[in-house]
Amino acid sequence: MTGIHVPDGYLPPTLKAPAREAFARARLEFHRTVFERTAIMFQAPVDGWRASAIVAGYRSFLQRLLFHDPAPMLEVVDQLVADADPAERAIALSLAASARADHDAARSNILEFLGGHVDDPYARHLHGIALFDLGRHAEAVVVLDELLADQPAFNPARNHLGAALIALGRSDEGVATLRDYVSRDPDNPSARDSLADALETRGELSAAIAELEIAVELEADFAYGWLHLGDLRARMGDQASAQRAYRSALDRATHYGQAFRDRVSERVTGQGLAASREGSGS
């Protein structure tokens, strides 16, 4: 996080220093989709976090994204929102809905929050993500474009903007957006994974592999990146290198759930080599 600007955003009044600052940093890492680092940060014993609905909300969404069962953390959210102020309740419920893959509820709750916090970049980003997850890609582009027009330094929005443009068939714009994201946040392994995804859709496998090799060098514990790298090397016919990448993914899956480890194990045994890569780790 050294040298990375942390944009201002809503902080619930119940969080006091230094918990506020710690949460702000962890929240930014979540929005940058550097989920392994986010998991480590949220595991820290920070006073005040256990009673915070917004922290529990982010942790529940993170559980789903790292292939864990979010149910235990969702129970915590349900308990904590009863005593949260309306703004914190709305954003925590939106995050919990995303953890449940109830994207309509996620959007409804984040819009409730935005009614009183129209400029909050994190909430606007979550709105764009909810629209993307609903398959409303054109609307996601509008929301994320407007966010970047107002706050061009909020780089994480470029990730989902690029993905939405590609989903709309605007591949050149999407790749350009993701290249811009990487240039603005070059130390973000997930940004490079997203660019690799985009390059893969265009058949530019060697370029995609090059991005992933940088990504796993930046973050050795980026197990999802290792999995992606293994899949692309397998597609290129380099099974030995693919197996090395899969084993690295399995060895480094500390923060991931069993579903992820099972998927990688299938690749290692050869049962899953032809399977399509799924999930939202990028």
Image (tube, rainbow, N blue to C red):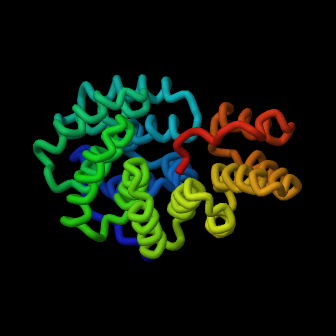
Q: Is residue 216 left or right of residue 119?
A: right
Residue 162 x %, y %: 40, 58
Q: Quadrant of residue 261?
A: top right
Q: Is residue 113 left or right of residue 130?
A: left
Residue 142 appears in the picture as rendered: yes
Q: Is residue 255 left or right of residue 118?
A: right
Residue 245 x %, y %: 78, 54
Residue 77, compared with residue 162, is above or below; it is: above
Residue 89 x %, y %: 24, 33
Residue 51 appears in the picture as rendered: no
Comparing 84 with 95, the one in front is 95
Q: Residue at x 42, y 48 (%)?
A: 167
Comparing 21 with 152, the one in front is 152
Q: Residue at x 36, y 37 (%)?
A: 135
Residue 269 x %, y %: 86, 37
Residue 19, compared with residue 60, is above or below; it is: below
Q: Residue at x 31, y 39 (%)?
A: 136
Q: Residue at x 41, y 27 (%)?
A: 76
Comparing 63 with 277, the one in front is 277
Comparing 71 with 169, the one in front is 169
Residue 50, compared with residue 82, is above or below; it is: below
Number of callouts: 0
